[in-house]
Amino acid sequence: MNAKLLFKTIFLIVVLLLLVLMGMHNLKEVTFSLPPIVTAVKSKAAIMYFAFFAVGVLTGTVLTAGGGKQGSRGSSSKTDKK
């Protein structure tokens, strides 16, 4: 198994564990307001944590995904030798 993939998996599990712990211990209702977009949303703090986490994951996915065509180095050298 790739060490980088293992590290990323363990990191994601730790972050999800922290998200579960925050959800278990923050049961009070909070008000979230972002005047240009949202006037006021009342919800439990755990749901807010989950929503912010989801926005962060989606942002990271969008920033790292795509990027155009990139061939692997090994395949280009094999085609050049023909």
Image (cartoon, grey):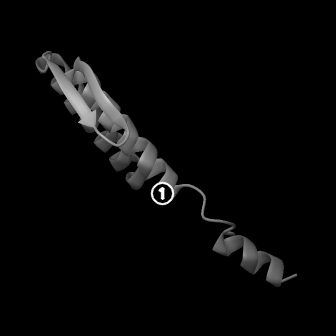
Relative vertical location of residue 82 with respect to residue 45 in this rendering, above or below? below
* Camera-nearest residue between 70 and 3: 70
- Name the residue type under label 1: Leu
**Is residue 18 left or right of 71 when viewed as pictured?**
left
Give neighbour class at mark 1: few <14, some 14-19, many 20+ (Cα, 10 Å).
Answer: few
Q: Residue at x 65, y 75 (%)?
A: 73
SS of the residue at dot 1?
A: helix
The answer to whether residue 6 is seen in the rendering is yes
Tell me residue 74's x, y (percent).
68, 73
Q: Please tell me in which quadrant of the rendered image residue 70 appears.
A: bottom right
- The quarter of the image holding the C terminus is bottom right
**Is residue 82 left or right of 15 when viewed as pictured?**
right
Q: Residue at x 25, y 19 (%)?
A: 43
**Is residue 1 left or right of 43 when viewed as pictured?**
right
Relative vertical location of residue 63 with respect to residue 17 in this rendering, above or below? below
Q: Please tell me in which quadrant of the rendered image residue 51 appears.
A: top left
Looking at this rendering, what residue extends furthest in the right direction? 82
Q: Residue at x 60, y 64 (%)?
A: 67
**Is residue 27 left or right of 8 when viewed as pictured?**
left
Q: Please tell me in which quadrant of the rendered image residue 49 appears.
A: top left
The answer to whether residue 1 is seen in the rendering is no
Tell me residue 7's x, y (percent).
33, 49
Residue behind mark 1 = 63
Q: Residue at x 15, y 15 (%)?
A: 27
Relative vertical location of residue 68 with respect to residue 7 in this rendering, above or below? below
Looking at this rendering, what residue extends furthest in the bottom direction? 81
Total numbered circles: 1
Tell me residue 24's x, y (percent).
16, 17
Tell me residue 60's x, y (percent).
42, 51
